[in-house]
Amino acid sequence: MPPTINDVAKHTGLSVGTISKHLNGIPVKPRNRLRIEKAIDELNYKVNEFARGLKTNTTKTIGILIPNLDNVFATTIVSIVEDRLLQYGYSTIICDYKDDGKLENEKLNFLVDKMADGIIFMPTGNCHDGIRSMLESRKPIVLIDRMIEGIECDVVMIDNLNASYHAIEHMIANGHKRIGVITGQKNSFTSRERLKGYCRVHEDYGIPVDEQLIQFGDYKFESGHQLCQKLMKLESPITGLLVANYKMTMGAVMALNELNVNIPRDISIIGFGDLDMIRLIKPALTVVSQPMKEIGEIAVSLLLKRLRDDFSNYPTIVRQKTKLVERDSVMKR
Amino acid sequence: MPPTINDVAKHTGLSVGTISKHLNGIPVKPRNRLRIEKAIDELNYKVNEFARGLKTNTTKTIGILIPNLDNVFATTIVSIVEDRLLQYGYSTIICDYKDDGKLENEKLNFLVDKMADGIIFMPTGNCHDGIRSMLESRKPIVLIDRMIEGIECDVVMIDNLNASYHAIEHMIANGHKRIGVITGQKNSFTSRERLKGYCRVHEDYGIPVDEQLIQFGDYKFESGHQLCQKLMKLESPITGLLVANYKMTMGAVMALNELNVNIPRDISIIGFGDLDMIRLIKPALTVVSQPMKEIGEIAVSLLLKRLRDDFSNYPTIVRQKTKLVERDSVMKR
DNA sequence: TTGTAGGCGTTATCAA
DNA sequence: TTGATAACGCCTACAA
């Protein structure tokens, strides 16, 4: 029903070959070019992307797979990735897997099989069967934020360990000794790394780690809220608190406000992720700022490189540094 | 390089026809089925979706196009839409256009041309050239949240006018007379509708509308924050405030907190969008709750209907009612 | 139930 | 520079 390249050929009196050339940027005689353009316009012709894909095995689109649409860290990076990729003539499609391992594999296969020339993927970090078969497909994939145990793959992430190390170190330097931490699930890659940093700095400064002060949440608002309340009930109170992601930070601050605990007089707090909402908390929060722009941009250039069939330095593992943004929520004592 | 249906045929000694039948759910002799499955497994064969698409003109995937990934209202609906569509065997791909009209058209065309059997689309509401040509493609499209002037298309949205009407009415019933409103851009469809409700209820209750009390924001956090400050500076103060979307509501509440204005003692406030973060504000906010679940589900069933080539009642325009959820932020005076 | 063969709309090769 | 033609991998009559 829709017009094909054949129709354009007939309409112009030229051959499909010539039309195809024009379509692909190969110059044709100006006179013919005009005729072709006119015909395309009149017929409202559009390339059939299936046929083209069948022939070229290429879509000029990149799939982006993230855990969840409500993951602001992820969507912020996605936004950057989209911008960049667009500059290079790639379209993007986004899929999310709702933090669900099964869906994660399905979506990944979907992107690999169906649509994408390459993929930018923020995995759960747990083990996957599907993921191996996907790597065999030879489609370039760049992981962001988390790596997957035992899988060789390009990955761009942040130095989680030192991120929390320096945050805690900052509090220690300000005289704090009992510092609580609200981190993510025990089986989460980023969460484990951040906790390691917490422990290591305690070790380095000769402060014993009190297990009570370590709370495992689920990176969601409500758990930050709850676990902060829990920490505030300790007989021997904490004077500092590190919260290991954005949403839990919001939840923790909300809890402190409700308990009328003054920041930073009663407690010093460092949050994670320098995102919009956090900037509006009073007093201004000292936070670990994640280099989202860099992560997105590096991931894209890495992917582009693989797309050019340049597999030098494979796998490339980039560990981007965070920055501690000092504002008003940490007090000397 | 990757195995084709031909390879599977050779490997099994059967014909491509038989393999294809099996692939498409047409029963073959059990003995052969086993052989085929084994071969597929051994060869790691996967259907080439380009070839299939070329033949069938179908991808079993639906495109979802939304203004921005940071639009929580949109992403919440997307999440619901994804669930539903998955149940019906459709995959989904998401695109966003960063609130940019040019990108909006490009992405729409991308989805129409390349990938999607149908589209769920939350438009800006401004006029588009691209959109007409897209409707000509005969691919089913269901608009959500906003309609487009002068374009006939299925659409599922909320009754914005009565939403704000009832919110303001609720404040009037509680004795308020000077009620401010922070709404969206003047050229936004939803924003205009919500403002109409504001004006109409004033009219119906014989309260003159004071232009000063109407503030046009941009549906973003910061503008809620700013405009609320501005409203609080009025010589003749307001006692009630309606904020016409989720982010601006957060911003407004933040501003009130900073100004030490007590809710609801000093000011009554009604927010828009009953989303997670809002639930954690103290005191609990009275809000206009938008039926996001319903919108998503209705949009999907409408799309599915069109996909079945049932174009009865075209265009269908659904205007879903909101609900005023009374909590603790409106006070009698 | 299975096999054969034509065609889906492009691109790419090669000859003119 | 242009044109003819053979793939690309799959689906689907139709015939066996």
Image (tube, coloured by chain):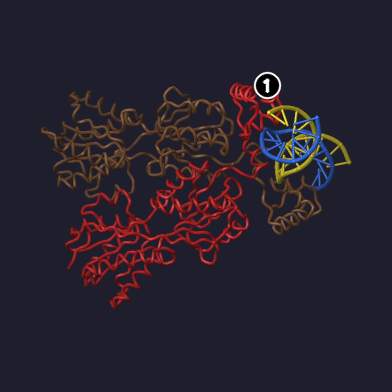
Chain colours: A brown, B red, C yellow, D blue
The quadrant of the picture occupied by the C terminus of chain A is top left
Q: Is residue A238 left or right of residue A146?
A: left
Count of number-bearing discs: 1
**Residue B23 at x, y percent in the picture:** 62, 32
Residue identifier under label 1? B11
Residue type, label 1: His
Q: Is residue A332 left or right of residue B146?
A: left
Q: Quadrant of residue B184?
A: bottom left
Q: Considering only vertical position in the picture, is B332 above or below A325?
A: below
Q: Give me the residue at 58% from left, 37% from top.
A: A114
**Residue B225 at x, y percent in the picture:** 29, 58
Q: Is residue B224 left or right of residue B79?
A: left
Q: Quadrant of residue A317?
A: top left
Q: Is residue A204 left or right of residue A99?
A: left
Q: Considering only vertical position in the picture, is A238 above or below B146?
A: above
* Image mark 1: chain: B
Q: Give me the residue at 61% from left, 44% from top.
A: B58
In the displayed orientation, state which residue is furthest to the left: A235
Q: Nearer the viewer, residue A279 or A237?
A: A237
**Residue A152 at x, y percent in the picture:** 48, 24
Q: Quadrant of residue A232?
A: top left
**Residue A223 at x, y percent in the picture:** 26, 39
Q: Residues within 10 Å of mark 1 (few under 14, many from 20)?
A: some
Q: Give me the residue at 54% from left, 52% from top.
A: B305
- Is disc 1 placed on a helix, strand or loop? helix
